[in-house]
Image: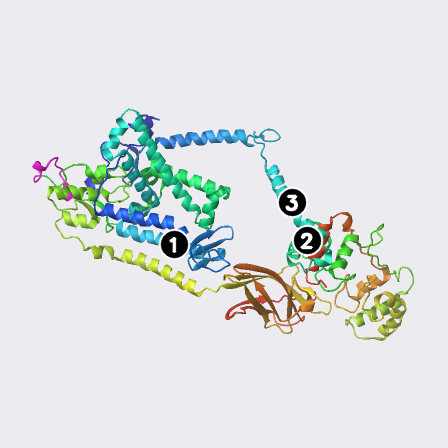
Amino acid sequence: MSSLESRRGGLYARRPDIFPKAVDGFFRRLKWAIMAVTLAIYYATPLLRWNRGPYAPNQAVLVDLTHRRFYFFSIEIWPHEFYYVAGLLVMAGVGLFLITSTVGRAWCGYACPQTVWTDLFLHVERFVEGDRNAQLKLKKAPWSVAKVARKLTKHALWLSIALATGGAWIFYFADAPTLGREFLGGKAAPVAYSTVAILTATTYVLAGWMREQVCNYMCPWPRIQGAMLDERSLIVTYKDWRGEPRSHGIKKAGAFGDCVDCLACVQVCPAGIDIRNGSQLECITCALCIDACDQVMTRLGRPRGLIDYATLEDCQAEAAGKLPVPLLRTILRPRTLIYFSLWAAIGCAMVFALGQRTRLDLSVQQERNPLWTRLSNGDLRNAYTIHVRNMEERPRVVRLAVAGLASAAMWDSLGSEKQAAPALSFTVGPDQVERRRIYVRAPATGAEHYQLTLVAQDQEHTKVTKTVRFERPEEGQ
Amino acid sequence: MAEQNKQSPDREIGTTSHEWDGIQELDTPLPRWWLWIFYATILFAVGYCVAYPAIPLANRATAGVLHWSSHGQLATEQAKAEASRASFRLAVANTPIERIPPHSELMRGAVEGGRAAFKVNCVQCHGTGASGRKGYPNLTDDDWLWGGDIKTIRQTLEHGVRQPGDDQTRMSQMPAFGRDGILNPDQIQDVVSYVRTISHQEHATLSAKRGAALFAANCAACHGANGTGNRQFGAPNLTDAIWLYGGDRDTITQTVTNARYGVMPAWGKKLDKASLNMLAAYVHSLGGGE
């Protein structure tokens, strides 16, 4: 207890208020562009159409949970092909390693939904309540009609954005125009409403209220980045060899470093940290402090880049008066090249596999109880359950044939032994699995293994072959 | 740079005084909202204990104000499933049995329903794979005592075999030739030789030749002049490869001496029409259906 009692700050701390100041510059504009692109992708993707014929949905990107299909433009993924999605996840993971080892937490700073939506919410907040100083003033001001009106406007705007976010999400799981009409008419499935409600709430809370705390307390990535960064990763860095010691006004400059301690970098930081303290867990490398500092340096007539993307190695070299490593060599180093080749190899393998896949599949399960049935003429009969997957968007006539089993004949449970023949033809519906129980009759002695071949009648080259056993009684049975 | 790598002074965060290999652990305070969430989970737990069965008592747990129970949930789900199947069962029950196989949708459902009913009512004798065992017919083969078309199977199911008080029950009465003294043991051996000859298990012998005459006199009435059986009387085909009790000499001797009187319940008394139709469809689909 004594160590707890001796604490200065207490066990729990209130979140310090952060009012990031608006800033303009190269990285701010880059962030605007990335925000526009990512939000456009998110909201517009479900609206894209893709013609797949009369038997499949015409939405370009659709996760059809009811029928267990994933549509992505010309690609359709069945549940048994989920390894493509797993492959995409592996690629995303390796891609994250690649990006992080090259340019630090660029994902966090530019593309992470938490960052994009928080950035949007901050912008809305500044639009309603004014910039940092106005917000600080508003916070101190006593409650008045004007203050309440501003707060209400802000939260209403936030909630509308949150609602649009949650609303767009459900369109990935059903035909967007139909679901949109049903949703507005109150006829959509309850799960649609609850999903929208949950995502509206999480967007509003996470981007409006939680903000950087999501990154600090909830996200594992800031912890993992320590293992991902090395001395040659480009991270947002304050060049202390140039900035220290700090002066507090232009007139003193010269005897001091370039940093005038104007706190511009601290005021624009959405994480509320001081980048001059070095690389920190809280820093998402949004690079807004670079923009802020560059403005000040330009005004002071000093070279830009007191705070800049730099590697630890370059910082040390520059401090010692040496030249930094050229950017290209920083980026193209063994580590990043290995990550890239790994990432590209998985991607190429997946594209190759996609090109090779057959959209017709046969699986055969041997009936195990009983393994065989003796027929009255002394022949034996085996039974199998077959699943024929027609993964194309049209009905197909397929022919199942026995090969390599002398005087064998088969029929299925919908027919009878009178129809027994060496082959069986039937139609499989578009995008469907046809399950049938088939019977194969053969003499009591003969081959132990034989082939079942499945051929799509409209495309003779689409052929699947499965080797199966023909079970016979053991000696004396 | 390294000297700059320290927390800003306004934070005033100490360490936990734990040190490992020169690495110290910062004693950063938890966010206040985290504490409120922790309190909220405690409140949730209390609410849960009030609403749901939670506190174990001597015989059972507290019921909770919502009166939820896993048994109740199961019963609700079962009732729901039952209700969703009701219209289908009605359709199966009201369709004449011979019209079910051509109706592929009805047939598929009936076969699946029959599979479930078979597991409950029939596996005790006929086995889980319906392949039977000694004395209990294999339902997957193409040999039928009373007939293997779906209507006949349905009839056998409904009225059973040798059920007293049911005038449509399957009744076959093979005399106990040995026990009742109709044939003496030597004659029985001759008949057995003959039967094993016509089923291609033995080559013709003198005994079989004597047996042929005895067979014509005693057995042909039911089993037919060629021994191919007669479904009208439930007399099995003696020339094929399938034996209900066994085709070896000892077993056939037993059968001829004492006769066999297998029984099957009349399921019409226990099951509803839908289940009977489903079972018939399932048995018919097992491979031997005619």
- What is the three-letter code of the residue carrying label 1? Val
Tell me the residue that label 2 is attached to. B114
Residue stretch in magenta: A239-255
- What is the three-letter code of the residue carrying label 2? Gly
In the image, residue B108 sits, relative to residue A457, either above or below, namely above
Is A252 part of what is drawn in magenta?
yes
Which mark is drawn over residue A90?
A: 1
- What is the three-letter code of the residue carrying label 3? Glu
Q: Quadrant of the C terminus of chain B?
A: bottom right
The mark closer to the camera, 2 or 1, is 2
Counting other residues with Cα less than 10 Å from the Cα at mark 1, is it few (<14), some (14-19), or many (20 or more)?
some
Q: CA distance from mark 3 to mark 1?
A: 45 Å
Label 1, secondary structure: give it: helix
Q: Are marks 3 and 1 in contact (CB under 8 Å)?
A: no
The residue nearer to you, when weighing A339 against A304, is A304
Tell me the residue that label 3 is attached to. B82
In the image, residue A296 sits, relative to residue A136, either above or below, namely below
**Residue A398 location, quadrant:** bottom right
Q: Are marks 3 and 2 in contact (CB under 8 Å)?
A: no
Instruction: Name the subunit of mark 2.
Output: B
The mark closer to the camera, 3 or 1, is 3
Is A294 part of what is drawn in magenta?
no
